[in-house]
Amino acid sequence: MARTKTVYACTECGGASPKWQGQCPHCGAWNTLVESLAAPVSTRFESVAGMRSTVTALASVTAQESERIATGLAEFDRVLGGGLVAGGVVLLGGDPGIGKSTLLLQASAALGAARKTLYVTGEESVEQVALRAQRLGLVQAPVMLLAEVQLEAIVAAIGELAPEVVVIDSIQTVYTEALQSAPGSVAQVRECAAQLTRLAKKRGIVIVFVGHVTKEGALAGPRVLEHIVDTVLYFEGDPHSSFRLVRAIKNRFGAANELGVFAMTERGLRGVANPSALFLSQHGGPVPGSVVTATLEGSRPLLVEVQALVDPTQGGMPRRLAVGLDAQRLALLLAVLHRHGGVDTGGYDVFVNAVGGVRIGEPAGDLAIVMAVESSLKNRPLPDKSIVFGEVGLAGEVRPVQRGQERIREAVKLGFTTVIVPLANQPRHAIDGARIMAVQRVDEALDRLREG
Ligand code: TYD
Ligand code: MG
């Protein structure tokens, strides 16, 4: 095969160099040169851009909702915004071992019944995939398997078999002969993904890429692909818990921030249709340091237990540890608690944990964290069946959060009777069976806690 000419392009300024250098000769940036194909854009894109585009008035375009291809896994369909879309390219990123291959094999098996599905495995042999299928009870599934890592061979197979859905597991193992960089490098991953994406658009097929999040995070990980693909999903979850969350980070065909919840079982991933009570531990009664909060995950509220343990420091620097929350945020909240709540944690170790491997990414959990710390420090539990949410500001104010009513309703539905909320989130009408306590400031919330 004829070698295509490659150049090294700077990711900062775009300047091209004929060979790799540590520093870009054009802009002086370090470690920014990445190998790429030297062929002019026009020839590389010819297949797609064969026709000239014409200018159209927006009003004259009749757009239709694209038809959804249901994967047969309701939770997966939910994050996708209703299912896969023909011509759409999806990236499923996540740590190794989290369950990406399992999810996609299950989805392929269900899809295969109605659509021709090709599963390209670059990491495992077909026997290994078959072994997993056996475990999942899917040996009879109508899925075509291909163990291949060379881009050109994969493209040829797609041309030959004409599948409607293709899974590439994983994009980091795919390489093209045209580039000299090692498989998994930024140049290879980007070029292979770009070529497959063009193929998907041209043929109107669905391609799902698996992408590993490397330890270093950005380098050659799914990050470099996020702008190429239509939908970016991240698979997360604590490896020690059986729950797995699939989160939509970007979706050209639906709402981002959607969340699918799965449980990893002996026989693969099982969707959890009603996850809001999943992340609550079952205490017999109220426990000091434990506060339940309502966070919002995509379009649905999720009740999560926040636990704090505040203990005198045994010599040395006080330790602060946050699991499932932002550590910086914890430091900030401890400062607010000191200044505006009069609670000094200076001589104490503070550990805070969101139960069940869930991550609380929004500030609505602030007030729960503050109250959990105070509750643990004073060894005094919150009233039984109580729930807390609200953002805490640096001035000690409690700020409203979005969609407060939905959070309150979800909490009441699950049997919570005392709800501590920001004043602006106070419902206009009384809610049956719920005692609503609206607070404006952190110290006010703490007073409520002290009163019981
Ligand atoms: P896998 O899908 O191979 O992860 P990834 O492709 O993201 O690297 O999942 C591997 C883990 O899932 C492994 O630790 C075993 C576990 N697992 C189950 O618990 N039950 C099952 O039925 C299967 C297939 C895997
Ligand atoms: Mg895998």
Image: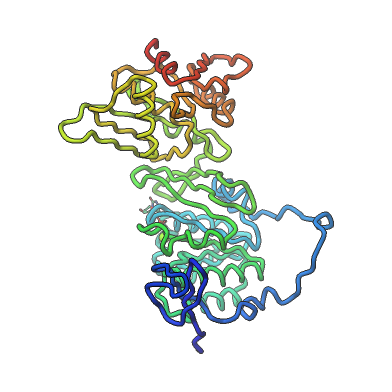
Residue 243 is at least partly visible in this image? yes
Q: Where is ligand 1, by quadrant?
A: bottom left
Q: Is residue 168 above or below residue 67?
A: below
Q: Residue furthest left?
A: 315
Q: How many marks?
A: 0
> Percent position (x, y) of residue 18?
46, 82
Q: In this view, does 392 lie above or below 242?
A: above
Q: Residue furthest bottom?
A: 2
Residue shown at 55% from the left, 67% from the top? 118
Instruction: Decide if residue 321 is on the left or right side of residue 156.
Output: left
Q: Residue furthest right?
A: 60
> Percent position (x, y) of residue 39?
57, 81
Residue 126 is at least partly visible in this image? no
| Foreground residue among 226 and 260 | 226
Residue shown at 30% from the left, 33% from the top? 351
Q: In which quarter of the image is the C terminus?
A: top left
Residue shown at 35% from the left, 39% from the top? 323
| Foreground residue among 313 and 263 | 313
Residue 378, by quadrant, is top left
> Percent position (x, y) of residue 288?
32, 21
The color scheme shown is rainbow
Q: Residue furthest top?
A: 451
Residue 381, by quadrant, is top left
> Percent position (x, y) of residue 139?
47, 61
Q: In this view, does 245 lie above or below 141?
A: above
